[in-house]
Image (tube, grey):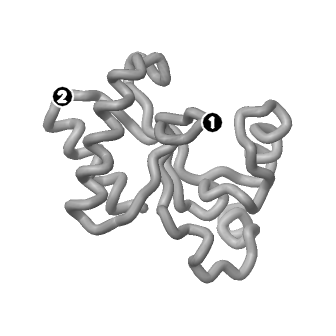
Amino acid sequence: MLEFERVFLKRLQKLRVPMFTHCFWRGQADQTARFVDGKSKAKWGQNPHNFGCAIDVIHARKAWALTREQWALLGHIGKEVSVQISVPVVWGGDWSFYDPAHWELKNWRELNWTRAETLEETFN
């Protein structure tokens, strides 16, 4: 995911589109709060952010306040990057639960995780 983020943001920078990663990893308290608030459909341990397998990329000045057309263009660019660097990702702008800032590894659930707490325990 780090390689996708690096190349995607570099590509956007070359196009003079000021974007940055707002969220890469999300801990248990934050994930639970987002689930309770209805901002996420996933509980703790069910979201790729809990494993560092997703990013939310937003505009440096407009944050999430981009038009659907602007998000669609970013989606197209991100998908191109994904193919070019052979990192399969899924874009949240293609979902019925529209989340255009979100990018996740396509196969994140298939990776060999021992427990959801590992990353959080490492840093806390």
Residue furthest front as drawn: 96
Q: Residue furthest right?
A: 36
- In the rendered view, tell whether residue 27 sits above or below residue 21: below
* SS state under label 1: loop
Kindly indicate whether the residue at mark 1 contacts the one at mark 2 (C-beta within 8 angstroms): no
Q: Between residues 120 and 37, which one lies in front from this camera angle? A: 37
Residue at image mark 1: 97
Instruction: Judge by depth and name the residue closer to the eye, 59 or 66.
Output: 66
Q: Is residue 68 left or right of residue 56?
A: left
Count neighbours of disc 1 (C-alpha within 10 A) and say few if under 14, some if 14 to 19, many if 20 or more: few
Q: CA distance from mark 2 to mark 1?
A: 29 Å
**Residue under the point 75% across and 50% down:** 42
Q: Is residue 57 left or right of residue 76?
A: right
Which element carries disc 2, helix, strand or loop?
A: loop
Residue 88 appears in which quarter of the rendering? bottom left
Q: Amino acid at mark 1?
A: Phe
Q: Which residue is more in the foreground, 98 or 12?
A: 98
In the picture provided, is 116 more to the left or to the right than 56?
A: right
Quadrant (top left/top right/bottom left/bottom right) for the C terminus: bottom right
- At a point 48% along the width and 34% down the height, the residue shown is 100
From the viewer's side, name the closer residue of 117 and 98.
98
Q: Amino acid at mark 2?
A: Arg
- Tell me which residue sits at (52%, 69%) in the image: 107
Q: Position of residue 58 (x, y in %)?
A: 43, 31
Q: Quadrant of residue 9?
A: top left
Per the image, the residue denoted by label 2 is: 16
- Residue 51: x percent and y percent? 62, 64
Question: Tag count in the figure?
Answer: 2
